Image (spheres, rainbow, N blue to C red):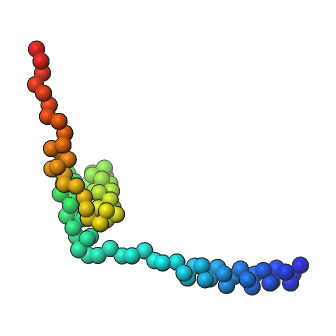
Amino acid sequence: MRNFLTALAAVILPAQIIVVSATIPAAAISADLAKKCREMAIKAHPPPIPPGNKAYAQAERDFFRECISKNGQMPEQGAQKDALPPLSAPHN
């Protein structure tokens, strides 16, 4: 039984090394894309007064991650606001 386990380990260990070394590392984002997405995130979520709002910070981080995942192709914030229907005047 011991010879079988030794033989099995001799086969499994090199196979694991090959699999681990064959994985492709994630590609790094470019500095230009990071700068563009950072500027868009700040524009979409301006800093609050007083500073330190955690909800604001999380929203900005989420926007930045989404921008990176979409390669900087985010819809304009003004276009989203214009897409809403106008409010009608109250009827008497």
- Residue 31 at x, y = what percent? 26, 75
Q: Residue furthest right?
A: 1
Toward which corner of the image does residue 66 lie, by quadrant?
A: bottom left
Residue appearing at x 61%, y 83% in the figure: 18
- Which residue is more in the foreground, 57 or 79? 79
Toward which corner of the image does residue 4 lie, by quadrant?
A: bottom right
Q: Is residue 57 visible?
A: no
Residue appearing at x 21%, y 67% in the figure: 36
Q: Classify the position of the N terminus by image quarter.
A: bottom right
Q: Can residue 48 be seen in this view?
A: yes
Residue appearing at x 66%, y 81% in the figure: 15
Is 66 positioned to the left or the right of 18 in the image? left
Above-or-below relation of 38 to 51: below
Q: Residue furthest top?
A: 92
- Which residue is more in the foreground, 36 or 59? 36
Above-or-below relation of 21 to 46: below
Q: Classify the position of the C terminus by image quarter.
A: top left
